[in-house]
Structure formats: structure tokens, C-alpha cells
Amino acid sequence: MSSSSTVSGHLAASGLAEVASSEASLRRFLHGLPGIDAVGLQARAAGLGTRSIKTTAKAYAIDLAISMIDLTTLEGADTPGKVRSLCQKAKNPDPGNPDVPHTAAVCVYPDMVPFAKDALGGAPINVAAVATAFPSGRAGLPVKLADTAEAVAAGADEVDMVIDRGAFLSGRYLEIYELIAEIKKACERPDGTAAHLKVIFETGELVTYDNIRRASWLAMLAGADFIKTSTGKVTVNATPANTLVLMEAVRDFRSATGIQVGVKPAGGIRTTKDAMKYLVMVNEILGDDWLSPDWFRFGASSLLNDLLMQRQKLASGRYSGPDYVTVD
Amino acid sequence: MALFDYAPAPESRAAAGDIASTYGHFIDGEFVESTGSEALKTVDPSTEEVLAEFAQGTEADVDRAVAAARKAFTSWSALPGAERGKYLFRIARIIQERSRELAVLESIDNGKPIKETRDVDLPLVAAHFFYYAGWADKLEFAGYGSNPRPVGVAAQVIPWNFPLLMLAWKIAPALATGNTVVLKPAETTPLTALRFAEICRQAGLPKGVVNIITGDGRTGAALTAHPEIDKVAFTGSTEVGRAIARTLAGTTKRLSLELGGKAANIVFDDAPVDQAVEGIVDGIFFNQGHVCCAGSRLLVQESVHDDVMDALKRRMSTLRVGDPLDKNTDIGAINSAAQLARIQELTAAGEAEGAERWSPSCELPSAGYWFAPTVFSNVSATHRIAREEIFGPVLSVLTFRTPEEAVAKANNTPYGLSAGIWTEKGSRILWMASKLRAGVVWSNTFNKFDPTSPFGGYKESGYGREGGRHGLEAYLDV
């Protein structure tokens, strides 16, 4: 990933360095982005959803989807035992099939990070921690910074922060820009490395696609490594259409700046069929450069078992059932 | 090779049902042999494989069909509207039940992708029958008087680009209003019309209400010139439309024509760019560009020309050209060798006249009729590719500076079937729509069809409207 100094270099080279120099200039930039026609956007997402993914393509896509999962538990009732069990599942999703890839990461609350790190041991699976007063984001900056610092100190490899939707909806874009930049700094470790920063918009609360596009550019300008749709805690989470907006934004941002940013839809993606639709979008909107866990993730919990059942079906020719995958 | 390569996902060819080796006509409720001996062949344009032989309709065949329709008219027009409606509802439901079969058959005979026949053609065909079935017992409320009467026997000649959909556009309103019909499908795509004849029998439609005769332009000429018909409805080329109009001049026969187009798709600098690019692609590459209302001229505001072209080329690179029966195919085969030759001639003229040609790299099958999606930039209004209808997957890009100039350039064509406007400014959409001389104006979308919406042209794109309440008028004696 780009370090923050090269990011500012890229932004300067593309004429975007001064965009966040004032509230007024940031607003002018974000409101100058091309509009989105909602009907057309939804039609495009639905159209890509009709692609028919069969046989070898399906096998490839199922394994790719498994490897892109941020296996998630974000409940008030989370315990060390639950987190350990989740980590075992992430390492070895299907006990009967050692050739099933591991997931990309597990995603937990900050206080669960030590248990997750411990359970994963040396496995090449990241620990992502949600921070900044997840899911509402309703806390002061010092609290959010402390929340982030705790997660990073405990060994989190990735931080999933939420933006302040209230600030966004009242037009205080610079405040969000500065929040993201501050959290980005809090992701730095003493050894000079940094936890990857995912910025969650809660698209279901931003509501309009124009807002989602503006939030995407705002986060990328402020240094997000990944942009993410939702917390999974509101009524409308990831949809193909709102994820398509994020994809168009990262595509256009790379064209403008040379900086590649990842995309993570989260919440509501439960079936293999759903996952295929997202991967088709990655394939046709973003292409090969994003077809890896480094650049695309699924924030999901129940999706993994459906992928495993479909994988078993593809291998054996018959459906097994929910008792042939593990409940964790 | 791309990382995520879609494996073949072919729809079953067998789903098309049995295709007979030879077909006659459908006259007076029966499949009958032609009085002549000449037969034509219909091929699968994606492979050039012969699918079936069918009859070249003779004048005697036309006589028989018109006589059957004339005879059936007396009792059909006397039926209460609600009874006619029942037949149409029944036909609509059978079309839905047999939609997969019809979609596959249409793809095989026409060359268009199964994705389109399945998701566009067939749903619209059924919707048209449902819509006009609903009008059958409400004609007194349609605004054409308290007791509108049918015209009589309608001669209907339809094109090859949407074979079954054009049949539905013609037959559904004609039957709802109490007329009987003799329909001639195009000579490259007769199969779904002949399958529709089976559906008429399955629905128990009274004999002679729908007659289908096949053949080329000679059969069409004999039908449209027949003395015993009361109305001609034609969709096709402006040249043939003119000939029909000359034939009917001075008679009491009524005529509706839906002809060619050279529509402008107008993109302003404040357009929703990603959706505009989708609209441009839908506008010209839908159905291989074999669409009379295709957005074949892209008028783009000069200040965003480069951005739009970059986005368009990137999008065109993801279009999948190939086997029409593969569910992931976006662009199928060109319908015939003759049409392919016409597209090749006009694109060669575009290059010779100095326009800049671009196509994404795509491998075309060796057999069959194929043409890669193509865009021409640096096109001038004087170029043939800016004036003549290409009727293929070829887009000509021109620029404009102001809304007034966009209107002037959009209207600068002998045609006037459709237009598209892309802008986030609502007031400009309304202003443009009132200035554009085109029968259909789409705003922030393109090529959207609905049975409730009238469709038809200005100027050399024809006259009369099909679809909606307006579409009833062509078949009522008002």
C-alpha cells in the first residue's frame, strides 16, 4: 500500500492536493462530481446480476469469494470462545476439505482483538477491528482515537472506521476529512508500518447515490485504503447498486491519481448467488487488478457456509445440507 | 487471459421445440401448402445453418388469406369486446407459458442474444397482448366516439429485427378493436410468426382472424396492393414504405408506417456520465443496432467529449460478442449477409470520408454474420455515416457547444423517430423535448419500451402511432 507521503505526492501530481484546503473548496469539489441517475445505476447493477456463472467459472468464483471474506462477528454477546471458534473457521472453513482457501480476515470489536490474534497464531489471516465508536460513530474525537489506538496496539492488522453521518448530512465535509486523516495517523505503529484503514460510510444512512459517491471521494482523498458500504447494523446494508457506486469511485480515483483503493461491501450478502453478482461487478467494472483479497472483501458471516455448500455441490454433484458445514 | 473467464453458459437449443423442415402458410386456421412451388430458406445467422424452408407466398395465396380474413371479419367484429379480450388474454398467457421456447426460437432465427429475447422481447410481447386485451371491452372510453368501429381486414408487414415483438405490436391492437389480419413476417425471420400461428390454434382463436403468409417483398407487395384489404400497417425501410404509400394513394385504404431513423443521443456536460455511457451502449448496441429508433448519432458536448469517449471505449471493451444462445452474450449475430454487406459498405465509407474508426479487440466466430461493435469519432454532418441509417452496431460521434446547437444538429435529418437527452437539469430536458422533432424522446435513458406508451415517427420515419391508447386509432374507423 502507498505510504501517506506518496499518497500526498500522487494527489499533488493530479491537482487534487488543495481540494481539502478549506471547507468551501472541498464542498465545491465533491458537488462537482458527475451526478448519478438512480434508475440507470440500478438497471446496470441488475443487468450485471443476470450473468450466468457456471462450471469452471463458478468454481473459481466460489474459492475467490471465500478468500475475500472478512469473517465477522460484531455482537454485544461476543465472547473469547465465540471469537476463537470464528478464527478456527477462518483458518479451515471446511474441515473435510483442506484445499478450501482460508478467509482474508476476521472482523471483531477492538477488545476481542487479542483473543483473535492468539487464536489465529501465525496463520496468514488478518484481524480487522471496527473502531471509532462503531456502529453509530457518535463520540468525540479523543474517544475515537483511543478506540483506534487500542485496536492497533492489540495487534489489529486492519481498522474498519465509521464516518460521522450526521456531519456528512449537515455538510461538514472537512470535519470528516480531518477525522479520517486523524484515524489514519492513529493506525500507524511504532515500527513505521500501519494498520490498513477501511472507511465505512453506512450507505443506508447517506441514502442518495450522489451522497455515496461524494463520501467515496472524500474518504479516498483523506487516505482510505479501502472504502466500505455499511456496518451491517442498519436496515439497508450493501446492495449491488450502492457497491457499484463505490466501484466506479475507486476506478475513477485511480484514473485521476494512480492510487488504487479497495472496496468492501458489508451486510446482507448471504448467498453464493449474491456473492457471484458482486464478483461479476468487480470483473466488469474494475477488472483483474481488483480481483484479489488485497482489493476486494466481503463483510459477512453466514455467506461462508453457503459458499461451502455450493462448493460441495459443485464437487459432488449433489446438495448436502446445513448439517454438513460447521456452525460456529 | 482474464482471471475471471466466464465458462460457456448455453441455453438449450432443444428448448426451441421442433422446427419443421418445410413450412406453408397459416390460412383460415389451418397450415396449408402454397399454391406455388417456390420455397425460401431461413438460416441461423450465427452459423449459416439452414433451419427450415418456407413458402414464397403467391398472389393466389394472398387471395386465399385475404378472403379468409374477410369472411372471419363479420363474426369477429360482431363479438362483444369482452369476448375478444378473452382470446387476447389467453394468447398472452400462452406466450408467457411458452416464453422460453419462443425466446430460443427467436434467437436462433434472428441471431440476437438470448439475454435480450428472454428479458426484453418476450416480456414485451406478452405485455402487449395483455395491454390491448384490456382495451377490447373499453373502446367506447378510448376517446374515439361512443361506438368506434373496426376498419376491416388489416394487411400487416413486419421487419426482421424484432420478429415476434413487431407481430405483437401489429396483431394485438388490430384484434382488440375487432379487425382481422393477414400478416407477413420478414423473409429472414419467419419462424416465430409461424409458431405464433400454433398459439392462435391453442387459444382457440376463431378461424381466419389471424392469417400468416410468408415470402419476400413480392408477397408483401401483393398483400399491400390487394383490393380487398382495408388497411396496411408496415414497419420497415423508408424506401419500401414510400412504395406502399404510392400504391395506396387514391384509394380509401388506411396506412400507418413505422420506418427508419437516425436518432441523436445527446449528452450534456452535466450528464450522469456512467449512466449516459450505459445509455449510449444500450442505444446503439442493443439488438446489434438493428433498431429503427437506435441512438446511432451520439451528440456530445465538446467540453466532455474526451471523458465520454474514454468511458465509452472502456465500456465497449467489456461487451461480449458471440453465440446468441450463450446467456452471457451481449451482442449476437448480424441478421443476414445482405445486412452485413450494408454495414460494411457504410463503415468503409466512414473511413474513406475521414472519420476515425475504433472497435475493441474481440474475436468473431468464423462462420455466420458478425460485426464488431464500432464507434466513429471526428464525424462531420456531411459524412454518410452521420446521415444514413446503418442499422448495425455502429455509432457516429459528433460534438456540439450549446443546447441550441444540439437541437439544430439533432433535428438535421430526414428522419425523426427518437432522441435521447442526458443531463441532470430537468428544465433543459423539458425545453429540449419540446424542440426535438422526434416521436419518442427519452431523458436519461434510452430504448425503453412499454405497451402503454405510443411509439412512432416524424418526417420520413413514418406516420401513425403504435402502442398505448393512441395505437387504437390506427385500427378504428374514426
Image (cartoon, coloured by chain):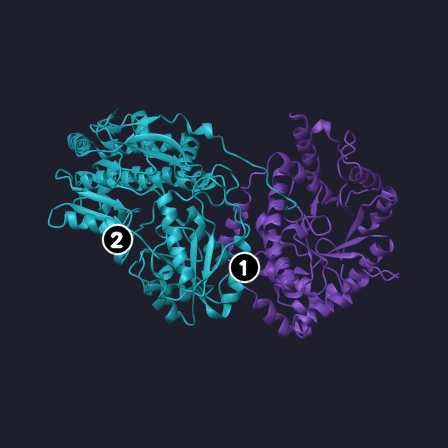
Type of amino acid under label 1: Ala
Residue A36: percent from left, percent from top: 53, 59
Q: Which chain is cyan?
A: B
Residue B214: percent from left, percent from top: 27, 34
Horizontally, is B360 left or right of A266 in the view?
A: left
Horizontally, is A303 left or right of B219 in the view?
A: right
Query: Which quadrant of the figure has residue B394?
Result: bottom left
Q: Identify the residue position indicated by label 1 in the image.
A: B311
Chain of the residue under label 2 = B
Type of amino acid under label 2: Gly
The quarter of the rendered structure image containing the C terminus of chain A is: top right
Q: Secondary structure at mark 1?
A: helix
Query: Which quadrant of the figure has residue B79?
Result: top left
Chain of the residue under label 1 = B
At label 1, counting other C-alpha atoms closer than 10 Å, the crowd grade (few under 14, some 14-19, many 20 or more) is: some
Horizontally, is B271 left or right of A259 in the view?
A: left
Q: Secondary structure at mark 2?
A: strand
Q: Colour of chain A?
A: purple
Residue A152 in sight: yes
Q: Marks 1/2: CA distance?
A: 34 Å
Residue B116: percent from left, percent from top: 45, 42
At label 2, counting other C-alpha atoms closer than 10 Å, the crowd grade (few under 14, some 14-19, many 20 or more) is: many
Q: Identify the residue position indicated by label 2 in the image.
A: B462
Above or below, A62 against A36 in this view is: above
Do badges 1 and 2 share one subunit?
yes
Q: Are marks 1 and 2 in contact (CB under 8 Å)?
A: no
